[in-house]
Image: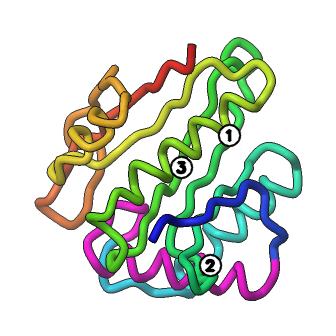
Amino acid sequence: MPLTFTLDPAVTPALRDGILDLWADVTDAGGAVGFVAPANREEIRPELVRHFAQMAEGRTRLLVGRDEAGQVVAAAFLTRNTHRLMTHWLWLYTVMVHPRHQGRGHGRDLLAAAADAARGMEGIEAVRLTCRGGLGLEHFYGSCGYKEVGRVPDAIRVAPGDDRDDIIMLLPLR
């Protein structure tokens, strides 16, 4: 079944808990979403609160994907660049699809919905994201139209002795 995507949903306790659960489940499945397994919801919560604060300030927008039961199973944050010379592109952060929904094309659908949302934002010409090396994520993003435009070797320390590249990807919208 296809997911239903909503841009800028109302932030409710159910949405907050759904995103926290999604973030923890993606982390525990080995997802590269800013934390390492085992996930700790109380460590994730402040990061989610920061995203919500940026949403309240109008700098960040939330895209949520729900399954047929209405559960949050995908999410991404679109954040405007605040540097005055770079306001023509935005960041895509914390791109997540629940592990039980992966392999069904929902990641592609989420990225397409994010690109559509970015196209609808005045002045936005490109989407930029970073991904953790060593997982092949750059190939997935590349298959969705993103181009690798930079790489910082060993910039992400997953664990002592386990450093990964920080890969910069760009999706031109024009």
Q: CA distance from mark 1 to mark 2?
A: 25 Å
Question: Element type at marker 1?
Answer: helix
Question: Is 116 placed above or below 171 here?
Answer: below
Q: What number is the disc on residue 117?
A: 1
The reply, left or right, for residue 82 in relation to residue 154 is right
Q: Earlier in the sequence, mark 1 or mark 2?
A: 2
Q: What number is the disc on residue 45?
A: 2
Q: Position of residue 42 (x, y in %)?
A: 57, 87
Image quarter where the C terminus lies is: top right
Image quarter where the N terminus lies is: bottom left
Q: Earlier in the sequence, mark 3 or mark 1?
A: 3
Q: Magenta region, mostly helix, strand or loop? A: helix
**Magenta-drawn segment:** 12-35
Name the amino acid, label 1.
Answer: Ala
Q: Which of the pair 157/102 is nearer the observer?
A: 102
Question: Element type at marker 2?
Answer: helix
Q: Position of residue 44 (x, y in %)?
A: 54, 76
Question: Element type at marker 3?
Answer: strand
Q: Quadrant of residue 17?
A: bottom right
For disc 3, the marked residue is 93
Q: Position of residue 66 (x, y in %)?
A: 59, 72
Name the amino acid, label 2.
Answer: Arg
Task: Bin the neighbour count of mark 1 within 10 Å (Cα to Cα): few under 14, some 14-19, many 20 and up.
Answer: some
Question: Is 25 placed above or below 113 here?
Answer: below
Q: Quadrant of residue 83?
A: top right
Task: Bin the neighbour count of mark 2 within 10 Å (Cα to Cα): few under 14, some 14-19, many 20 and up.
Answer: some
Question: Is 68 placed above or below 32 here?
Answer: below
Name the amino acid, label 3.
Answer: Tyr
